[in-house]
Image: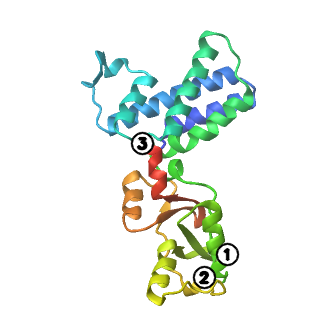
C-alpha cells in the first residue's frame, strides 16, 4: 500500500492542526486516516463487501473489526495491534468525552503511524530493530564475540567505512572449532572469519520479500537511500505471533 494523494493531503492537514494546537481535531482526523488505511489493507488481504465479523457486514466495520480481521491473517505485529487500539481509544475519548489529548501524545501517534500509513502493514520498517550492532572488517574477533555475548545475538553484520560488506555468526566460529579442534585466536581480524553480507531491503519492503531474505540468511538489513536504518532477524518474526 502506497500513500495516495488524498491520504497525503489528510496527513498534512493533521500536522497543520497539530502546529496550531488543534490537538483534538488532529487526533480525530488521524483516526480517520487509520481507519481508511486499515480498510484498504483488509480488502487487499482477502476481505470483500461480503465478508462479515460475526453478523456484522463489511460495510459496517470499524477499526476494531479491521484489526480483528488482519490479526487473523497474522498481518499485524503485537506493537501495531496495541498502538492502533490505543490511538482509536484516545480518539473516542477526545470526540465523545471531551478529553483534550496532549500535543506530544498526538505528535507521537503521527510518528508511529507514519510507516504504516506510508508503506502498509507488515513492512520492513514495522519489524526492524533500529539499533544495529555490528563490527568492522578490521576489528579483532574478540570484539565480535564480546558483542554477541553482551547482546545475546547469534550473528552480526560486518561493515567497512559504514558500508555492509559481510556478516559473522556463531556457526562460523563453531565450524572453525570443529575443523581445527581448537577455538580461533581472539586476535584474528573479523575479515578472517567473514561470511556473505546480509541481503538489503528497503524500508517499505513487504513481508514476502523479508521472508525470502531470511530463508537463506541470518538477517536482512533495512536501508533508505543507501543508509542502513535497521536490521531484521528471524527472531523478529515472533512479533507477528
**How far, Cα to Cα, is label 1 from label 2?**
9 Å
Quarter the C terminus occupies: top left
Q: Residue furthest left?
A: 50
> Of discs 1 and 2, which sits in the foreground?
1
Residue labelled with disc 1: 143
Of the numbered discs 2 and 3, the one sitting upstream in the chain is 2
Alpha-carbon neighbours of circle 2 within 10 Å: few (<14), some, or many (≥20)?
many
Q: Nearer the viewer, residue 73 or 107?
A: 73
**Image spot of residue 50 (x, y percent):** 24, 24
Q: Residue at x 56, y 69 (%)?
A: 156
- Which sits in the foreground, 169 or 125? 169
Q: Earlier in the sequence, mark 1 or mark 2?
A: 1
User: Which image quarter is the N terminus in?
Assistant: top left
Left/right placement of residue 172 relative to residue 56 reads: right
Q: Earlier in the sequence, mark 1 or mark 3?
A: 1
Task: Name the residue located 27 percent from the left edge and 30 percent from the top edge.
Answer: 48
What residue would you read off at disc 3?
241
Q: Residue furthest bottom?
A: 180
What residue lies at 36% left-to-right and 17% top-to-bottom?
A: 60
Please indicate, yes or no, whether residue 153 appears anywhere in the rendered image. Answer: yes
**Circles 1 and 3 in contact, beta carbons < 8 Å:** no
Q: CA distance from mark 2 to mark 3?
A: 35 Å
What colouring style does the render use? rainbow
Any mark on residue 65, and which?
none
Question: Which residue carries the number 2 mark?
Answer: 190
Amino acid at each position: 500500500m502506497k500513500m495516495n494523494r488524498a491520504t497525503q493531503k489528510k496527513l498534512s492537514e493533521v500536522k497543520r492542526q497539530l502546529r496550531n494546537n488543534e490537538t483534538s481535531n488532529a487526533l480525530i482526523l488521524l483516526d480517520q486516516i487509520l481507519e481508511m488505511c486499515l480498510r484498504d489493507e483488509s480488502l487487499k488481504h482477502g476481505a470483500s463487501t461480503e465478508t462479515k465479523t460475526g453478523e456484522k457486514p463489511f460495510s459496517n466495520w470499524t477499526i476494531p473489526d479491521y484489526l480483528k480481521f488482519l490479526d487473523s491473517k497474522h498481518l499485524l505485529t503485537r506493537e501495531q495491534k496495541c498502538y492502533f487500539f490505543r490511538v482509536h481509544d484516545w480518539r473516542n475519548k477526545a470526540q465523545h468525552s471531551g478529553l483534550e489529548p496532549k500535543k506530544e501524545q498526538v505528535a507521537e501517534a503521527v510518528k508511529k503511524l507514519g510507516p504504516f500509513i506510508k508503506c502498509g502493514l507488515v513492512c520492513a520498517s514495522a519489524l526492524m530493530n533500529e539499533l544495529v550492532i555490528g563490527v568492522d572488517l578490521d576489528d579483532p574477533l574478540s570484539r565480535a564475540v564480546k558483542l554477541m555475548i553482551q547482546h545475546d545475538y547469534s550473528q552480526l553484520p560486518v561493515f567497512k567505512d559504514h558500508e555492509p560488506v559481510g556478516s559473522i555468526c556463531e556457526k562460523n566460529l563453531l565450524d572453525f572449532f570443529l575443523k581445527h579442534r581448537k577455538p580461533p585466536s581472539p586476535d584474528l581480524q573479523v575479515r578472517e572469519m567473514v561470511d556473505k553480507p546480509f541481503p538489503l531491503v528497503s524500508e517499505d519492503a513487504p513481508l514476502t520479500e523479508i521472508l525470502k531474505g531470511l530463508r537463506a540468511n541470518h538477517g536482512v538489513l533495512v536501508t533508505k537511500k543507501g543508509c542502513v536504518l535497521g536490521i531484521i532477524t528471524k527472531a523478529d518474526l515472533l512479533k507477528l505471533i
